[in-house]
Image (cartoon, rainbow, N blue to C red):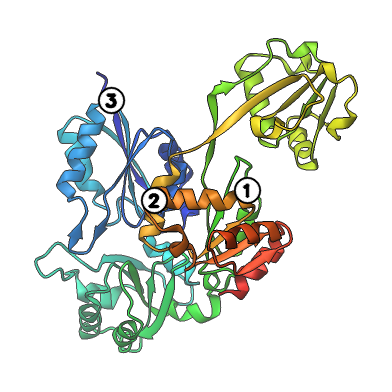
Amino acid sequence: MKTGKVYLVGAGPGDAGLITVRGLECLEKADVVLYDRLVNPLLLERVNEEAECIYCGKLPDRHHLRQEAIQQLLIDKAKEGLRVVRLKGGDPGMFGRAGEEAEALVDAGITYEMVPGITAGMAVPLYAGVPVTHRDFSGSFAAVTGHTKAENGQPSPNWKALAEGIDTIAFYMGRKNLETIVEQLTTYGKSPHTPVLTVEWGTTGRQRTIEGTLSTIKEKADEANVKNPAMTLVGEVASLHKQLNWFEKKPLFGQFVWVVKTSSFPGEIANVLRENGAEVLEAPCYLFNKSKVTFPDEVSRYHSLYFNAFESVSYFFDMLKQRQIDIRFLPKNISGSTQRIVNKLAEYGIFAEKQNIQNIDNPDYCLCIGSEESLSSITNLSSYCTHTVIKSSKTRETLDRLIQDDLINAVVLPSSKAINTVIEELYNAGVSAVEWLNNKTIICYGPHTKEAAIAKGLTVHSTLTSPNSKELVSTLRSDL
C-alpha cells in the first residue's frame, strides 16, 4: 500500500477567514483532519464530506489527546495511505509543536509538508488596532511563550535582553504567569508605566481587550476574569488601541448567528452579516444525491429549457460537462422562474428571460429542470430533468463543537421548514431543541414562520417581513 502524506497546517489565530489559501486547499483535500481546540469550528465546514475529523483539543494541564498519541495517529493514518491534515491554531511553527511532530514523522519515514499560518502574536494585536511595529514607537518585536513545559510552567527567556532590547513583546498563553511576566520585566528595567494589552480570544467574536500598564495589568485582568487563550502585548504601541481599535466597533461584533438552511441555495445574507462583524454558521449543508438524478439522453431535441430552481442551474451545467455535451447544442429559448435564476444563468453566458411556466410555448418540447420538490406541482410539462439534495453529515462535527463551546447566540429561521430542520439537527446533536433555542435570539421571516415556531414552543424575538439584510443587521444590532 502506498504511504500517505501529512500536512502540518496553520489555521490562523481564530477568525475562520484568516486561514491561508494553501491551508484551505490542504483542508479541502484531506482524508483525515486532526484539529486543536483553538481552531475555529467553522473551518470544519470546508472539510471533504467523506473525511474523518478527530478532535485533539487541549487545555492547560488537561489534554484530550496527549502529544505522543497525536503523533502516533498521524503516523498510523499516513501508513493507511491517507492524506492527513494536522490543523493547528495560529502558525504550526510558533509554539505549535510542529517541530516535534515533524521529527516523529521523519523517524517513521512519513512524507510531510509544513503550511504556515498567521500567528496570533501579530494578528491579535492588529485586531485590537495595534501594529506590533510602528515608526514612532517600535522597531523590534519578540514572540515569547508565556507557559513552558517546566514543572512550574514558568517562562524563562532572557528577561534582561527583553526588557532592555525589545520594543514590543508578545506573550503567548501567559495569563497564568502574568504576575511573573510583570515582575521580571520591571526587575530588569522595563518601566512600570509601559502600556500593556491583554487580549482574550483575539480575532473572534469573543475578543476582549484589557488595557493597562505593567503596574496595573495583572489586577485588571483578574477583575475581568480573563482566561486563556489570551495574548499579552507589552510596549508603547499598545497605547494605540484607543485610537485605532476597529474590530470590536463593528455593528454585529459579538454575534454568532446560525442561519438555518433548507436548500443548497448559496447564502446572500451570511456575507452581509460577516461584513458587519458577526460570525456565521450556514447549516445544514446540502449535497446533490448522485443516485437520484434524471438527465435526458438528447438535450438537443428540445425546443426550450425552463429552470425552476436556483441550485439546478449549476447542477445542469455540471451534468453537461460530465457528459461532454457542447452548450452549442442547447435550444435557443431558455427561461427561468425567478430573476435570481436568470441572473445565475447569465454567469454561464446564457442571457435568459424570467417567465411564468404557464406561458411556455409548445410545452411538449420544453425540458423543465429542477429539484423533485420544486417540480412536484408542475403538471403542464411532460419532460423533466430532476435531482434531489441530501443533508451533508459534515455539519455535525461543526455544530457539536459550537454547542459545546456555547458560541451561537442568535438563530435565523427563513421559513417554517427551517424550524423542523433546526429541531432535527439539535436532536441529532443530543440537545433539547426547545431548551437550547429559548436561550438564543430567534428571528423569523414572515408571520407563518413565527406562528410555526411558537407552535413548537419557541420564543420568537423578532419577525422580519422579508429576507432583508439591512433589516436583519438592524434587528441583531438592537439585541446586543
Which numbered marker is on residue 81?
3
Residue 355 figure quarter: top right
Q: Earlier in the sequence, mark 1 or mark 3?
A: 3
**Does 103 sit left or right of 439 as displayed?**
left
Which numbered marker is on residue 267?
1
The percent coordinates of residue 300 (x first, y second) are: 77, 12
The residue carrying pointer 3 sits among few (fewer than 14), some (14 to 19) or many (20 or more) residues within 10 Å by Cα, namely some
SS class, disc 1:
loop
Mark 2 or mark 1, whichever is nearer to me: 2
Which numbered marker is on residue 429?
2
Residue type at mark 1: give it: Gly
Instruction: Work out how far the residue at label 2 is from the one at label 3, CA to CA, in angstroms.
Output: 31 Å
**Does 178 sit left or right of 131 as displayed?**
left
Asked if the residue at tag 1 contacts the one at tag 2, i.e. Cβ–Cβ closer than 8 Å, the answer is: no
Q: Earlier in the sequence, mark 2 or mark 1?
A: 1
Q: Taking the image as drawn, is residue 354 in sight?
A: no
Residue 51 figure quarter: top left
Asked if the residue at tag 3 contacts the one at tag 1, i.e. Cβ–Cβ closer than 8 Å, the answer is: no
Work out whether residue 421 or residue 11 is closer to the camera in this orientation and state it. Answer: 421
Work out whether residue 35 or residue 305 is closer to the camera in this orientation and state it. Answer: 305
The percent coordinates of residue 74 (x first, y second) are: 23, 38
Residue 53 figure quarter: top left
Work out whether residue 181 or residue 134 is closer to the camera in this orientation and state it. Answer: 181
Work out whether residue 295 or residue 42 is closer to the camera in this orientation and state it. Answer: 295
Q: Which residue is located at x 45 percent, y 41 percent?
A: 22
**Does 132 sit left or right of 475 as displayed?**
left
Q: Earlier in the sequence, mark 2 or mark 3?
A: 3
Residue type at mark 2: give it: Ala
The residue carrying pointer 2 sits among few (fewer than 14), some (14 to 19) or many (20 or more) residues within 10 Å by Cα, namely some
